[in-house]
Image (cartoon, rainbow, N blue to C red):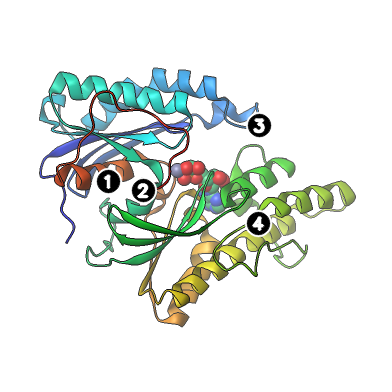
Amino acid sequence: MVNFFSEPILALETSCDETSAAVLFGRKVLSNVVSSQATLHEKWGGVVPEMAARAHVEAILPVIQEALLNANMNLAEIKGIAVANRPGLVGSLSIGVCAAKALAMSLDTPLIGVHHLEGHILSVLADVGQSTLFSLDRFPHLCLMVSGGHTELVEVICPCQYKLLGQTLDDAAGEAFDKSARLMGLGSGGGKAIQEASFGGDPNRYSLPRGLLRDPYNFSFSGLKTAVLRLIEQQVETIVLKDLAASIQEAVAEVLAQKALYAAKEQKSKMLTLVGGVAANKRLRELLTLGCHQLGIEFYTPPFELCTDNAAMIGVVGSIRLARGEKDGHGMDTLANAPLP
Ligand code: KG4
Ligand code: ZN
């Protein structure tokens, strides 16, 4: 059985270029405010760590205030603070962590540091008023976690207990989308821009590599961006953008779906979950919905707003860990890299 902290908590997420604050009561998300820095980094072609940290400093207090306002609560009613403290950009993480420590100290409430990827994995539990809630008895299950920095297949034994089955050996799936989008002149729009550009495109028009198909649980996406670069260089005059976008999307989604479904079958999983920013991809959702149906296993993916970085998912983990009596001291660190707990 999964237990949640029985009082309202405030959660913060600043691991990369999104400043987010959420208020939760148990798994119920009372508010979830996300302020994105995407336009700030646009012209640099990627996230600039120093600029990201400074933007978090400016955004953190207004975002917290908005989260409290949307939840119709004041600070005195908050009885616990959860914050993403690893892995991520250390400068960015430390803004959320400093704010969390200051709040926990002044409110005299427990503080808990949360692993960002554990947040993605347990984002399925968050209740944002969606029509189908993830049933709390669906453990163990298999999780495909796909974001801008990570691509992992994880057996979720129960909340807080995980077994890593496989991961990318080079680029993450989201990184493949992000780099391809830039090569195609779609700026920093990443996977979302490729998905939009692929509308009406032919996914079989360009033949793109499917990496590491013989290694069942690990992934490789670095060959894809090189192939996209070559294709653009060689056919710059004739390239059909929507066909290229559809072909890239198909290459990424097909490999992810194929490996996740194979793992689900091998592990005799009764359920597969899809989480992280790339989980917002409609083609990937479609392939997994169909594949799971054919295998006779359940498939669950959270609503879009819980897929990309957000504080609600950090709050879910925080609420579970606080309910178990766990807490961190005010000397809690931030870490650029950290294995799953
Ligand atoms: O989880 P997330 O917000 O941040 C990280 O923890 O990295 O994931 C961001 C990633 C980016 O690489 C972005 O291109 C990708 O999620 N993404 C998508 C879509 N929306 C966001 N990829 C494919 N299709 C989408 N619709
Ligand atoms: Zn993330």
Three-letter amino acid code of the residue under disc 1: Val
Question: Pointers 2 and 4 in contact (CB under 8 A)?
Answer: no
In the rendered view, tell whether residue 24 sits above or below residue 55: below
Name the front one of labels 2 and 4: 2
Instruction: Tell me the tag on residue 118.
Output: 2
Quadrant occupied by the N terminus: bottom left
Q: Are marks 1 and 2 in contact (CB under 8 Å)?
A: yes
Residue at figure coordinates x 58%, y 49% from the top left: 172
Alpha-carbon distance for marks 1 and 4? 35 Å
Mark pair 3, 1: CA separation: 32 Å
Tell me if label 1 and label 4 are in contact, CB under 8 Å: no
Q: Quadrant of ligand 2?
A: top left
Q: Position of residue 285 (x, y in %)?
A: 49, 64
**Disc 4: which residue:** 198
Q: Is residue 22 visible?
A: yes
Task: Name the residue beneath numbered marker 3.
Answer: 45
Task: Say above or below: 104 vs 229.
Answer: above
Name the amino acid, label 2: Glu
Residue at the image point whose x is 19% and y is 25% from the top: 104
SS class of the residue under badge 4? loop
Residue 135 lies, with reference to residue 323, above or below; the image says below
